[in-house]
Structure formats: C-alpha cells, structure tokens
Image (cartoon, rainbow, N blue to C red):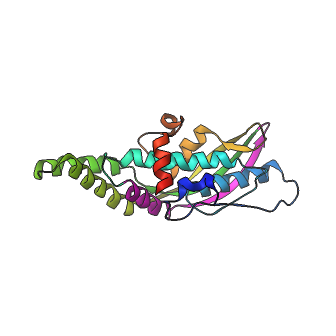
Amino acid sequence: MNSKFKFASILLVPFTLAALTACGSSSSKDDGKKAAEAYVGAYLNKDVNYDEGVVSKEAIEELVLKRDYKAVQEYNMNGNKDKEILGAYYEALKNVEYTVKSASENKDEVKATVSIKGVDVSGISEDVMTYRVKIRREQKLSKEELNSKVEERAVEDLKSAQSKDETDVELSFTKDSDGKLKLSDDSIGRLENTISYFNENYSNHTGDVPEEFKEIEKTK
C-alpha cells in the first residue's frame, strides 16, 4: 500500500487497488463494466482489481475518503467513537451484495447497470437522537459522557443493520482529461442511497474533506 492510501489504514478490510495486467484494447462496454466493478467494489472495501488505463485511481481514493468522512459526520456526536463508528459501518457494508449486469456507451458517456442488495441504515440517525433524549432525561451525565453513549448506540445499530431488497441502479461515467472514467456526482448519490443511506447526501460533500480529518485517518 503506497503513501496515498495511508488514510485507509483504519479499515477493518484493507482497501487496496491491485493493477491488472494490460491485455490489449477493450471496448467501451467492457470499460463500463470494469469501472463499475472498481468503484462499487472500492466503496464496499473489497480488494479492487482495476485497469489503470480505464479507471481514475485518484477519483476512487476521493470516493472512499468522502465515504468515511460522511459516515463519521452522520453518527458522530462530538464524542470519541470515530474509529468504532467506522468499524461498525464497514461491518454493515460486508453484507452488501452486487452484480454488474450490463454496460453501454453513448458518445462520451459510459453507463453501467448494477444490481445491489444494500443494507438498511436509514433509521439509525433518528433512533440515536431518540435515545439521546431518553438517557439525557434519565441519567445525569456530562456532555462528553452523553455523546459517547449516543455514539455507542449508533455503533450497535450499525452492527445489527439488516439487508435491503435488491435494486438496480444506473451509474454513469465521464472521461477525465486523461481519458479515464470517473463516476459522476449524481451516480455517487444513487450508489450511496442504494448501498446504505446518509441524511447528508453527496451533493453536500462535494468539496474537499477537511485536512484535520485526513490527518486523523493517517494516524489511526
């Protein structure tokens, strides 16, 4: 794992990108399938084989980093359970199943249809906030103790998340200046909401992840 992937060191399942041996030219349809496998697989913490002539490694790195940041933003109550929250979210992602069904090309846009059986985390935020109100009334806790207990509840909920019904999602890819395929922002939002769910959707996190979060990731 090179230095660019230090931020992934806290993953329970190490995130790696193993380069495929080049085997001649491929069609855009094949490229669409390769890209879908790479981006979806990376999101789910699977060891990813990728064709470096087809997929943008930098875009995959960014996707995974923003996924981690959003998971912490969703369930962090300013307590001290960031690592536990991410670990529980990764455990939930292990239950996700997917199959790349088809791919197509239309001018400069490549599309792929992926069948995904996601994991239902949609009610967790509401549950932990209800739990927060309950224990705040019942127990005399400092702010730090309260936040820590609420985050523990989020961890428990994530670990017990149930699978969702299988759904087909269409992903679209655009080509960067090097001709490599990047997953569109709209497609990332659809992918996220099919796999799991965040109250804060992808459009609210298209900016840079704060440097302090990157530093936390590197040291864990």
Q: Quadrant of residue 106?
A: top right
| Residue 94 in view (yes/no) | yes
- Residue 15 place in picture, x, y as percent: 58, 60
* Residue 87: in magenta span: yes
Left or right: residue 94 versus residue 20 is: left
Left or right: residue 128 versus residue 31 is: left
- Residue 165 place in picture, x, y as percent: 48, 57
- Residue 99 place in picture, x, y as percent: 63, 60
Closer-to-camera residue (100/157): 157
| Residue 193 in view (yes/no) | no
- Residue 150 place in picture, x, y as percent: 26, 52
Asked if 66 appears above or below 23 in the picture, the reply is above
Q: Which residues are magenta?
A: 82-108
Closer-to-camera residue (129/20): 20
* Residue 78: in magenta span: no
Name the residue at 63% across, 39% down. Answer: 184
